[in-house]
Amino acid sequence: MFDSSEYRIGALAGAVAFVLVLALTVMAFTALEPRRTDSAKSDWSVSLSEPDATITPTF
């Protein structure tokens, strides 16, 4: 009938399927969470460029 290797393969496949379903569930719930507005995040602002520099030769 069935030998033990078939049971082991089935148990391994079931464990992998369980982990994948669990991971997909966690990803779905985290995608539905509202976005956080932490003040700890860096506020990246880019400064304006320098005005045109005039190069004057010095001798």
Image: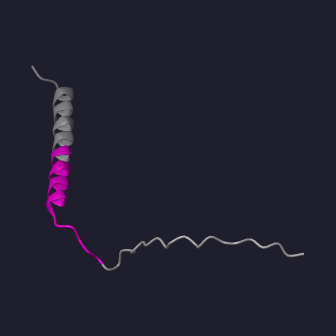
Q: Position of residue 48 (x, y in %)?
A: 50, 72
Which quarter of the rendering shows the C terminus? bottom right
Residue 5 position, x and y percent, is 21, 27
User: What residue is shown at x 82% (from left), y 72% (from top)?
Assistant: 57
Q: How is the image coloured?
A: one colour
Q: Position of residue 38 (x, y in %)?
A: 29, 76
- Residue 55 magenta-drawn? no
Residue furthest top in the image: 1
- Residue 6 lies in quadrant: top left
Instruction: Tell which of 58 and 47 is nearer to you.
Output: 58
Q: Quadrant of residue 12?
A: top left
Q: Which residues are magenta?
A: 20-38
Would you say the magenta stretch is mainly helix, strand or loop?
helix
Q: Residue at x 18, y 29 (%)?
A: 4
Image quarter where the N terminus lies is: top left
Q: Residue 27: x, y in percent?
A: 20, 54
Please, is residue 11 above or below residue 43 in the view?
A: above
Q: How many marks?
A: 0
Camera-side residue: 55 or 45? 55
Q: Residue at x 16, y 32 (%)?
A: 10
Residue that protrudes farthest toward the bottom in the picture:
39
Q: Where 44 sits versus 10, above or below? A: below
Residue at image position (15%, 38%) is: 14
Above or below residue 24? Residue 2 is above
Q: Is residue 31 left or right of residue 52?
A: left
